[in-house]
Amino acid sequence: MTRRRIPVSALIGLLFTGGFVFIALFAPWLAPHPNSVVVGDVWAPASAQHWLGTDNIGRDLLSRMIHGTRVTLTIAGLATALSFGVGSVLGFVAAVVGGWLDQLLSRGVDLLMAIPTLIFALVVLSVLPTTITVLVLVVGTLDATRVFRLSRALAADINVMDYVEAARLRGEKTPWIVFSEILPNALTPLVSELGLRFIFAVLFLSALSFIGLGVQPPDADWGNMVKENKEGIVFGIPAALIPAGAIAVLTISVNLMADWVLNRTTDLKGGRGA
């Protein structure tokens, strides 16, 4: 059996994604200053004391970026886990059980998807307190609808395969069929979708923070850092471009890694029949 080397693009994705995760895990020890303490002049340039300069009220931008990485990745990661945990299981169950349960779940998802995601989030977040828990539930619920549709379509195709029918004839129950027969065979496209859903969660959270309904001060995430410093762009101050660049780098690196995992999984599946 030949071993395939990890392509350069995947290594780049792993390096940057791993770097962001490392920063998120050890943010309190890596940040040179507290998150919300004013340490210098407004929009001071980069210096030996402040490597990225300061923000719109004089807080250390590097420290804000480090703490913001932790908040952004935590909320996006939890929301993605929630969306896949709920969406994939419900999609598989709907396809396997069928009947009224399938209709109930599918029409409920259709109803949620008929409402524009931003409007749905605006309505919910204008009523409920904007906490991390609420943000995770809102982003995860909206993401779960897309995961449900994909999972149900995959399970509907797999559900008519001979090995699934054989499992039914053996008397296997629905949970066993879902987790032992359908999930392993639907894993490849779900892995690809995982990266896309995570990036959607990051971008959606940043958009909510940019309009003031996401992470609330004094906590920081990349979206509200762009909002706080956007006026400086007119004066050539890059404070808003740094968190925007972090969003772009994370998006590219996660997609590079997801593409490699998808290709690797596909190749392994193709080689089993040999």
Image (cartoon, rainbow, N blue to C red):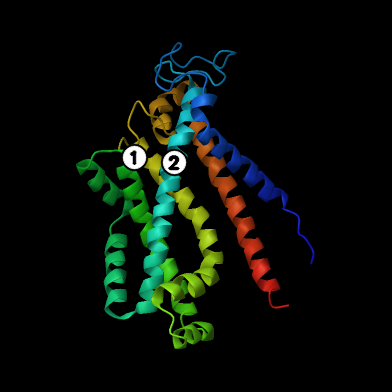
Q: Earlier in the sequence, mark 2 or mark 1?
A: 2
- Single out the residue that lies furthest toward the right: 2
Q: On the image, numbered disc 1 is attached to which residue?
A: 132
Q: On the image, numbered disc 2 is attached to which residue?
A: 74
Residue 30 falls in image quadrant:
top right
For residue 123, above or below residue 58? below
Q: In the rendered structure, which amino acid carries the disc numbered 2? A: Thr
SS assignment at label 2: helix
Looking at the image, residue 258 sits to the left or right of residue 130; the answer is right
Q: Residue at x 57, y 51 (%)?
A: 255
Q: Residues within 10 Å of mark 2 (few under 14, many from 20)?
A: some
For residue 80, above or below residue 26? below
Measured from the top left, where is residue 21 in percent x and y?
54, 39
For residue 85, above or below residue 103? above
Discs 2, 1 touching: Cβ within 8 Å = yes
Image quarter of the C terminus:
bottom right
Image quarter of the N terminus:
bottom right
Q: Residue at x 40, y 78 (%)?
A: 173
Distance, label 2 to label 1, CA atoms, is: 9 Å
Q: Residue at x 58, y 55 (%)?
A: 258
Residue 16 falls in image quadrant:
top right
Residue 267 falls in image quadrant:
bottom right
Q: Residue at x 69, y 78 (%)?
A: 273
The numbered disc on residue 36 is none
